[in-house]
């Protein structure tokens, strides 16, 4: 594939961990563990491919409503990820970034996240953004409030610049795994001209060859941004 048709920013709704586990008679938390291992694999692959921005939806504002033990397991996986992966990410030039309101997370989760962000802040390869306690409507409301507080003019540009994603290009390609075909409050404003790719493959099974299929499909799309 020629580089011109490679998306600059790929965003992923990582769905289907629970079903992956259920199919194997395993607890849901093991599905999330397998999902985390796949995050590792896909980050490496996108970095190798020369994709500049990868954003994943790891925990929505709605996910707080899941049973406490599942939320706890997800938090432990996040702590492990930030504690154990950061050195390797740094070696590969990956800069970690987080979007969302993590103020509701426990201090030890926030600390692990902050350490990861600090350690990789000077990396200039792939920007790997993890959406945590993220909801797009809340993000837009927050942006509008800060525009009002600052007394700025409300324009498409100022709204963009007050979103969590102020320093990133909009996603070119949004992938959702596991057969659901909706955005579920992810990057609503930023997705205005994104291409969508849906696959029945469950997130833990979405490997390098599945990513290649998505990238090939993207390369075939004719993006007109409302023009002709
Ligand atoms: C959706 O599957 C997945 C989630 C709600 C969590 C995604 C989290 C991870 C992959 C792990 C942590 C991430 C990082 C970046 C370290 P689901 O539980 O809704 O699956 P189901 O629809 O089959 O039940």
Image (cartoon, grey):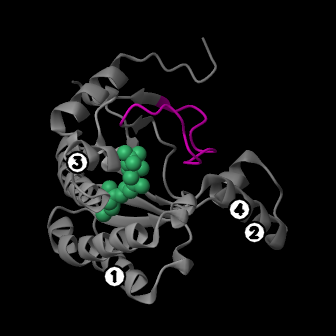
Instruction: Nearest to the eye among marks 1 and 4: give it.
Output: 1
Give the distance between the C-alpha atoms of the residues marked 3 and 1, in whole angstroms: 21 Å
Q: Position of residue 56 (x, y in %)?
A: 39, 52
Instruction: Mark 4 and ligand 1: say if the CB distance to the nearest ligand atom is below 8 Å.
Output: no
> To which quarter of the image does residue 34 belong?
bottom left
Q: Is residue 215 left or right of residue 64?
A: left
Residue tagged 3? 42
Residue under the point 23% across and 46% down:
204
Q: Position of residue 46 (x, y in %)?
A: 24, 45
Q: Is residue 211 visible?
A: yes
Element under disc 1:
helix
Range of magenta residues = 178-195
Give the distance between the C-alpha atoms of the residues marked 3 and 4, in whole angstroms: 30 Å
Element under disc 3:
helix
Among the two numbered marks 2 and 1 on one chain, the one whose residue lies closer to the N terminus: 1
Image quadrant for the C terminus? top right
Give the distance between the C-alpha atoms of the residues marked 2 and 1, in whole angstroms: 28 Å
Q: Position of residue 18 (x, y in %)?
A: 33, 50
Give the class, few, some or many, for how many residues have Cα within 10 Å of label 2's Cα (few <14, many ≥20).
some
Q: Is residue 184 magenta?
A: yes
Residue tagged 1? 112
Residue tagged 4? 143
Q: Position of residue 194 (x, y in %)?
A: 51, 33
Q: Is residue 108 above or below residue 57?
A: below
> To which quarter of the image does residue 113 belong?
bottom left
Among the two numbered marks 3 and 2 on one chain, the one whose residue lies closer to the N terminus: 3
Among the two numbered marks 3 and 1 on one chain, the one whose residue lies closer to the N terminus: 3
């Amino acid at each position: 594939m020629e580089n011109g048709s490679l998306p600059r920013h790929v965003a992923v709704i990582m769905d289907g961990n629970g079903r992956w586990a259920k199919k194997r008679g395993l607890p849901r938390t093991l599905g999330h563990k397998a999902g985390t291992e796949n995050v590792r694999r896909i980050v490496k692959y996108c970095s190798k491919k020369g994709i500049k921005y990868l954003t994943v939806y790891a925990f929505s504002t709605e996910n707080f409503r899941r049973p406490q033990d599942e939320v706890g397991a997800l938090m432990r996986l996040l702590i492990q990820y930030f504690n154990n992966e950061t050195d390797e990410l740094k070696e590969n030039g990956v800069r970690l970034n987080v979007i969302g309101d993590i103020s509701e997370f426990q201090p030890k989760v926030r600390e692990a996240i902050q350490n990861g962000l600090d350690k990789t802040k000077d990396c200039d390869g792939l920007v790997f953004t993890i959406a945590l306690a993220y909801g797009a409507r809340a993000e837009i409301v927050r942006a509008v409030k800060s525009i009002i507080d600052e007394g700025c003019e409300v324009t498409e540009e100022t709204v963009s610049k007050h979103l969590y994603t102020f320093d990133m290009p909009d996603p070119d390609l949004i992938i959702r795994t596991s057969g659901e075909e909706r955005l579920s409050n992810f990057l609503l404003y930023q997705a205005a001209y994104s291409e969508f790719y849906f696959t029945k493959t469950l997130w833990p099974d979405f490997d390098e060859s599945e990513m290649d299929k998505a990238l090939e499909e993207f390369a075939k799309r004719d993006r007109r941004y409302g023009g002709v």
